[in-house]
Image: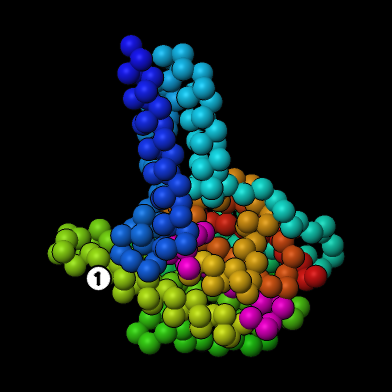
């Protein structure tokens, strides 16, 4: 009879060690190896399933100390792994505040009219779209949006109710998509990006053995793209960089960005902020970063018009 509690105790310790290892690998080792990249970039909820099972078993067996240990580990490490946030740096809204929406629209496959209706309903001062290039039966969707000035480059679009004084394409890394920059009449510079997608499933279908090398290659590209963004904008307090970063809020690429910029959702949003996939969000890969703009609020919009959910921010100059 004593062997069962002992076995539960061993399993509980192994599970807690596993959770801690996953957290450390995904956060600090991260993109240095293909295995830790995979650990850090996949949905983290899966790692908590053994904890949930152990909590049920310990409760059923009335092992109170082990139950308390597993619940504590589940709450603490679960919070860290799932990336829950609470507002820590919200500013009070004033007359200079403006709203910004970032949205990967997956080539308008959800219907461009419906996407426009969403934009009109939320009325952002500025919206930034990714994957807005011509695809399939919808053709080129973004030609105009009533009430907005538009600039675009490839699959990137910036729309603004304020006049756009200047715009340019910023090269991030050789052989990768560029960033689109627009300077607005209020003096704010808006930059939208889409970092290279991992597309692991497509690679695995063609050649499973090439996945580790593919992961390492994309991680290297991400680090170069992030370094270019930091180099270009770290000294501009009036810039906001937003878009689809195709990576989670952990790891060396994320840390390199947050050393120079604030993660605006982490400062002003509630919960994990998951945006992908839209049908059952398990990953936060869509962001807005800035060093000088203060977030008032951040919200992931419940919409399934794309495979991503849009995020809307209320921002103001400090």
Q: In this view, does 123 lie to the left or right of 40?
A: right
Residue located at (32% from left, 18% from top)? 3
Residue located at (72% from left, 78% from top)? 237
- Front residue (pair 43, 113): 43
**x then y, percent, for residue 6:** 37, 23
Q: Mark 1 points at which residue?
A: 213
Mark 1 Cα-neighbour bin, 10 Å: few <14, some 14–19, many ≥20: few
Residue 261 makes an appearance in the image: yes
Above/below status of 144 relative to 114: below
Q: In the image, is residue 273 part of the stretch drawn in magenta? A: no
Residue 126 makes an appearance in the image: no
- Front residue (pair 259, 111): 259
Above/below status of 157 relative to 297: below
Q: In this view, does 235 lie to the left or right of 173?
A: right
Residue located at (43% from left, 20% from top)? 58
Badge 1 marks a residue whose secondary structure is helix
Q: Quadrant of the N terminus?
A: top left
- Name the residue furthest right: 95
Residue located at (37% from left, 76% from top)? 220
**x then y, percent, for residue 271:** 59, 45
Above/below status of 87 relative to 285: above
Which region is colored magenta? 234-252
**x then y, percent, for residue 301:** 57, 50
Q: In this view, does 35 lie to the left or right of 98?
A: left
Above/below status of 99 relative to 259: above
- Name the residue furthest front: 2
- Front residue (pair 95, 252): 252
**x then y, percent, for residue 269:** 65, 51
- Front residue (pair 317, 68): 68
């Amino acid at each position: 009879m004593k062997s069962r509690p002992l076995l539960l105790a061993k399993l509980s310790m192994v599970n807690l060690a596993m959770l801690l290892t996953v957290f450390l690998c995904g956060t600090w080792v991260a993109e240095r190896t293909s295995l830790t990249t995979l650990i850090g970039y996949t949905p983290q909820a899966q790692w908590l399933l053994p904890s949930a099972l152990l909590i049920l078993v310990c409760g059923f067996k009335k092992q109170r100390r082990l139950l308390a240990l597993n619940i504590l580990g589940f709450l603490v490490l679960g919070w860290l792994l799932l990336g829950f946030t609470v507002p820590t740096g919200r500013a009070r809204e004033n007359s200079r505040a403006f709203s910004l929406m970032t949205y990967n629209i997956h080539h308008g496959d959800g219907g461009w009219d419906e996407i426009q209706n969403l934009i009109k309903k939320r009325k952002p001062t500025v919206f930034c779209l990714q994957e807005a290039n011509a695809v399939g039966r919808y053709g080129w969707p973004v030609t105009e949006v009533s009430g907005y000035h538009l600039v675009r480059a490839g699959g990137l679009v910036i729309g603004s109710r304020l006049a756009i004084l200047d715009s340019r394409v910023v090269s991030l890394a050789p052989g990768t998509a560029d960033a689109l920059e627009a300077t607005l009449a209020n003096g704010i510079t808006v930059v939208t990006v889409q970092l290279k997608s991992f597309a692991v499933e497509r690679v695995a279908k063609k050649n499973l053995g090439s996945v580790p090398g593919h992961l390492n290659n994309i991680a290297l590209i991400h680090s170069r793209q992030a370094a270019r963004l930091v180099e270009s904008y770290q000294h501009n307090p009036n810039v906001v960089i937003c878009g689809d970063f195709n990576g989670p809020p952990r790891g060396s690429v994320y840390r390199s960005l947050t050393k120079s910029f604030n993660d605006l959702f982490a400062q002003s949003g509630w919960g994990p902020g998951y945006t992908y996939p839209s049908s059952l969000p398990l990953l936060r890969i869509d962001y807005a970063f800035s060093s000088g703009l203060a977030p008032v609020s951040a919200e992931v919009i419940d919409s399934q018009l794309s495979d991503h959910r849009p995020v809307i921010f209320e921002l103001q100059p400090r």
